[in-house]
Amino acid sequence: MIRAALSLLIILFLGCGQSLAKVAVSPVIIAAEKVQAGQVFEVLCRQLGEEPVEVRLSLALFERDHQGGVVLLEDVSSVERVEQLLAVERRQFLLQPGQGEVVRIKVLRTDFEALNGVLFITPAQQGGLSTRCAVLLLLYANGGETRLGAAWGGGP
């Protein structure tokens, strides 16, 4: 199950890396237990290409299907829900060649037991195939005793 999720992330990462922008993102999964309001998580975005690129950020939710695959939830209510719980410090920025930028995701509220969020990093492109990178956020707050490995089909 975790292999399926990692495979999806690798495909998303490689697709993003093959775009004209060549944006690399790390980490691709953030997993945390006993999350508290005010807690901040960081993601590094790096421009590996030779041209400046405008990067846009957005939040959504995801769930797992019966086969363990990731299903992205980008409908209005899912986006509204995640934006009540998480905040991204900015929605877009310019990355120069070789430059890295840290994106901060702040937990606003913890009135959830488990939150499956996703941060999309989308390089703005002029024409061509649009790609984006995704960072999965597996956050456990109230009752945060859930074992993260078990939640992803892994062992103890």
Image (tube, rainbow, N blue to C red):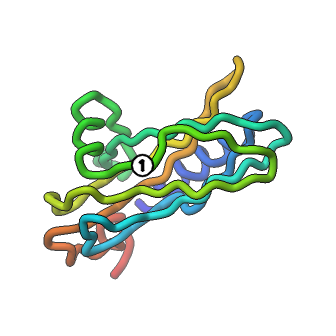
Seen from the viewer's position, the closer of residues 8 and 127 is 127
Horizontally, residue 42 falls left or right of residue 114, namely right
Kindly indicate the quadrant of the structure image that contains residue 25.
Answer: bottom right
Residue 55: give x, y in percent of width and height: 61, 38
Residue depicted at x 50% and y 63% = 42
Residue depicted at x 31% and y 53% = 116
Residue 115: give x, y in percent of width and height: 26, 56
Q: Classify mark 1: helix, strand or loop.
A: strand
Q: Count residues near mark 1 (Cα–Cα under 10 Å), then give few for <14, some for 14-19, many for 20+.
A: some
Residue assigned mark 1: 88
Image vertical order of residue 40 relative to residue 90, above or below:
below
Residue depicted at x 28% and y 45% = 82
Residue 54: give x, y in percent of width and height: 65, 34
Q: Residue furthest right?
A: 50
User: How many numbered badges does the structure rendering display?
Assistant: 1
Type of amino acid at the residue the image marks with label 1 = Val
Kindly indicate the quadrant of the structure image that contains residue 1.
Answer: bottom left
Residue 98: give x, y in percent of width and height: 80, 52
Image vertical order of residue 76 relative to residue 52, above or below:
above
Q: Which residue lies furthest to the top in this view?
A: 127
For the C terminus, give its image quadrant. bottom left
Kindly indicate the quadrant of the structure image that contains residue 52.
Answer: top right
Image vertical order of residue 15 relative to residue 76, above or below:
below
Horizontally, residue 35 falls left or right of residue 52, namely left
Residue depicted at x 49% and y 52% = 135
